[in-house]
Image (cartoon, grey):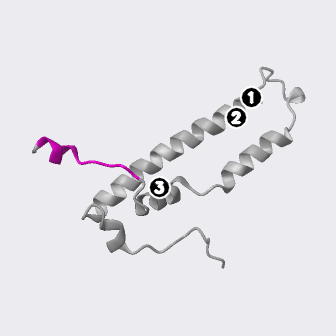
Amino acid sequence: MAINPSIITRDLDKVAAPTGNIYESLHIVGNRAKQIASSLKEELNTKLSEFASTVDNLEEVFENKEQIEISKFYERMPKPTTLAMEEFMEGKVYYRFPEEEESK
């Protein structure tokens, strides 16, 4: 059984370090992953909409190699959670704690 090379064991102390709390760190990563997934979905839908057909007749619908290649490209991309975790660990994700700002 081969293990997916995109699966990486993370040191939880390093993940928790920026916020001081593993759950807050994972919440931030999760929110960033949602943003990435949303933008990738929008980008893919925009590219695929160029191939949209107004005809619903199955006999007139045919496979488009370019459309298939675009779909395969997005399937091979790293998952949004992987991208979000990398950004977070590299300090590229901006986050703030509004309740701390209010108490100042």
**Magenta region, residue range:** 93-102
Query: Residue 28 placed where, x, y %?
Result: 35, 53
Q: Where does the N terminus fall, quadrant-wise?
A: bottom right
Secondary structure category for the residue under label 1? loop
Secondary structure category for the residue under label 3? helix
Q: Which residue is mark 1?
A: 50
Of residue 36 and residue 60, the one placed in the foreground of this image is 36
Query: Residue 46 placed where, x, y %?
Result: 66, 32
Q: Is residue 14 left or right of residue 10?
A: left
Q: Which residue is mark 2?
A: 47
Is 55 drawn above or below residue 84 in the view shown?
Answer: above
Q: What residue is drawn where x is 67% and y is 49%?
A: 74
Which of the marked residues, 3 or 2, is nearer the chain's N terminus?
2
The CA span between labels 3 and 2 is: 23 Å
Contact, CB < 8 Å: mark 2 with mark 1? yes
Q: What residue is drawn where x is 39% and y is 59%?
A: 91
